[in-house]
Amino acid sequence: MFTLAEVASLSDIQPTYRILKPWWDVFMDYLAVVMLMVAIFAGTMQLTKDQVVCLPVLQSTVNSKVQPATQYQPTESGQEPKKDQKDSSGRRTNLDFQQYVFINQMCYHLALPWYSKYFPYLVLIHTIILIVSSNFWFKYPKTCSKIEHFVSILGKCFESPWTTKALSETACEDSEENKQRLTGAQSLPKYVSTSSDEGSPSASTPMITKSGFKFSADKPMIEIPSVTILDKKDGEQAKALFEKVRKFRAHVEDSDLIYKLYVGQTVIKTVKFIFILCYTANFVNTISFEHICNPKVEHLIGYTQFECTHNMAYMLKKLLISYISLICVYGFICLYTLFWLFKKKNTFNTLLKRSEKRVREESSFSDIPDVKNDFAFLLHMVDQYDQLYSKRFGVFLSEVSENKLRGISLNHEWTYEKLRQHVSRNAQDKQELHLFMLSGVPDAVFDLTDLDVLKLELIPEAKITAKISQMTNLQELHLYHCPAKVEQTAFSFLRDHLRCLHVKFTDVAEIPAWVYLLKTLRELYLIGNLNSENNKMIGLESLRELRHLKILHVKSNLTKIPPNITDVAPHLTKLVIHNDGTKLVVLNSLKKMTNVAELELQNCELERIPHAIFSLSNLQELDLKSNSIRTIEEIISFQHLKRLTCLKLWHNKIVSIPSSITHIKNLESLYLSNNKLETLPVAVFSLQKLRCLDVSYNSIAVIPVEIGLLQNLQHFHITGNKVDILPKQLFKCVKLRTLSLGQNCITSIPDKVSQLLQLTHLELKGNCLDRLPATLGQCQLLRKSGLIVEDHLFDALPSEVKEVLNQDTSIPFPNGI
């Protein structure tokens, strides 16, 4: 016999799961408990009081008339024949008590319908099956883990201090926003937004986007006070919850197993209801008080037929009717559930969208994303339980809410003192701050008023506020994979003060649109994908607004120079194109860049010097590094470029230098390193203005004696060749400051090296030297730091020479030419 507590435990559900049970599931649970109590009550009554009482059916009235004086004499062997007593009253059967008990037990099994005997047990089994079906989705291994995780996260989200803070601040912002709309929204400029929440855009508050030149401006004087204070611990907990929700959503949204299992168990309960109702209706009339029994034990009793009464028939029939009523209600609720699930093809999605819309409206977070599959199902079930749960959980689905939390945590972590520690001096002796992979731009950054360079890298939610107007020294800004948004006041400041901008991106659409509106910008560096398919999307037609742009640096994979770049060509003085190995084919637009003084076309797979370059009359420096140039016969055309002073043809495949190079009279620097040169023609040494000659890493074996003609030569690099003898004429170039002779086959250094009184850098490492000349000590400006040679050769020098070379004397020397 079951106790009530033991049976009740079968339908016990963990309290935390109740938030996933809508009203119909709760109602069906109560109905199942009532049916369980009916089964227990009927079973208890049946075990204690269930029995039948039988009496034999005597001979018919007709037989009694034919033989009125005859009474049936039992044939049982232990009975004595009895005499007829005509004057006797009552019903005489001649059966003793044991025979009655025997007949009652036999007739209980033979005459009583099976449903009267097993009804309580069937009700108990059916009810247990229904209870198990109702809660199977909570117990099935592939669903219970997800449900437990969801309930755990939901509880933490509900109780998180950030939830209360976010909803409270949003309510304050909404009220402030309404005031602004009523008072001054119509008087603001076209592209100025009155919204203080960038995550809640409206038709009248456009932000700067990728498709147009619109930007938002938050009024800097309006600050909404914090309703609650969020300490660091609560902030870390909230950030962890955002991450948990994100990962749980990604894990659950990939399938709809929970939803299908819920539908399946509802179908099973419906089928069970129909089955119970069908067979129960057939047996409801079989439960009767009177029954006729034919036990076929005449040889033992003497009677062939008995009439029996079932004392539990009335009670069982009433319980059965009650059970049928309960199961009908249960079935109608199952049908309603199925109707709710299947009334339309997209019923569930429709209901979910209604719930999401209500959550967005009530939580004021309009950016809550659309969810799907099991995650959507769980959220909708929670919304059916209590809308407050879905409203508070929606805080952790909103990117706006997450960005606000990041901003608070960011400002807690990155204080003014910490940022000041990260400020450094760059090569140009400017104060520089580099922020990498932060959730946003800390407010304290804008308090660094003496900062010259600001680098923002991998900060997807960067926002430049009006406080940047305090940074009066800021002239250079780097945005590396950082599509920063700016307020109106901040944009006005950048437009008037910013001089240099570096933008690194993966796709051209990531370039902030406000970049093209910086009218006072002098230098622009674009690093990213600008292939021919995306050129039309670049929006560089707006570069024509950059009237003061002088330097344009493009590091990409161009197949042609975008025609839109020529819109700013009259203003440019320097154009740099670094390709990633993509062949640059179309170069005709270069002809329009008449004011370009410096041109770099690196790693563009050029096979010859482009003819368009010969039209650049103001060109002073040409760099064609890392191409595939084999011949430079076109170099004769450079004679028309009267201002050309620097020619860089390094890292190519050039095998010879044409004699026509002598026509470039004004050439001062010639870079031919990392090519395939085997000789240096005499024509090179006719360039009297040449101050720098770099032919490193070729296959040159001989330095011509004509090198002595280059009286203005200051830097000579021939490292990594096959030179074995140094001509004495080399040391007639008395203005030499840098002499790189490393990695050759030189066996000795002439004593005449002492004539190079201005020598500050001498590279000799990697040769076949036995000793160094003692006359090195006469090179007044040479020091040990500028002498690149093996240690044993330096140690072999006379002590007085080493003392001279070891002198620590700072020597002013310009690194450039």
Image (cartoon, grey):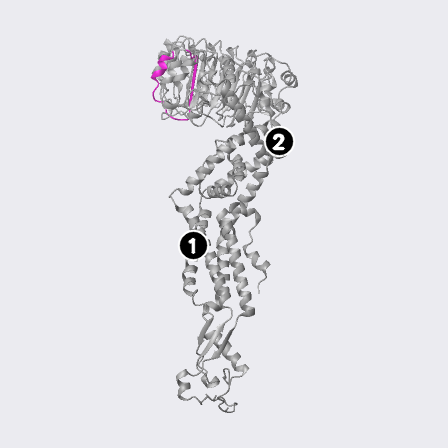
Q: Nearer the viewer, residue 142 or 53?
A: 53
Residue type of the residue flagged with mark 1: Thr
Q: Earlier in the sequence, mark 1 or mark 2?
A: 2
Judged from the image, the secondary structure of the residue bearing numbered disc 2 is loop
Q: Is residue 111 above or below residue 325?
A: below
Q: Is residue 519 magenta?
A: no
**What range of the chain is rendered magenta?**
571-593
Residue 57 appears at what percent x and percent y? 45, 80
Figure quadrant of residue 5: bottom right
As displayed, is residue 642 above or below residue 266?
A: above
Specify few, some or many for label 2: CA neighbours under 10 Å numbering under 14, 14-19, or 20 or more: some
The picture places residue 14, in percent across and down from the top left corner, at: 57, 50
Asked whether residue 438 is in view, the answer is no
Report which residue position mark 1 lands on. 270
Q: Is residue 803 left or right of residue 764?
A: right
| Pair 1/2: label in front | 1
Q: Is residue 212 above or below residue 258?
A: above
Report x, y in % for residue 163. Answer: 57, 34
Q: Name the residue type under label 2.
A: Leu
Q: Is residue 574 magenta?
A: yes
Q: CA distance from mark 1 to mark 2?
A: 50 Å
Given contact means CB atoms under 8 Å apart, are the residues at marks 1 and 2 in contact?
A: no
Residue 801 vs residue 502, the one in the foreground: 502
Please give the residue where the numbered disc 2 appears in the rendered image: 230
Q: In x, y percent, where is residue 46? A: 53, 68
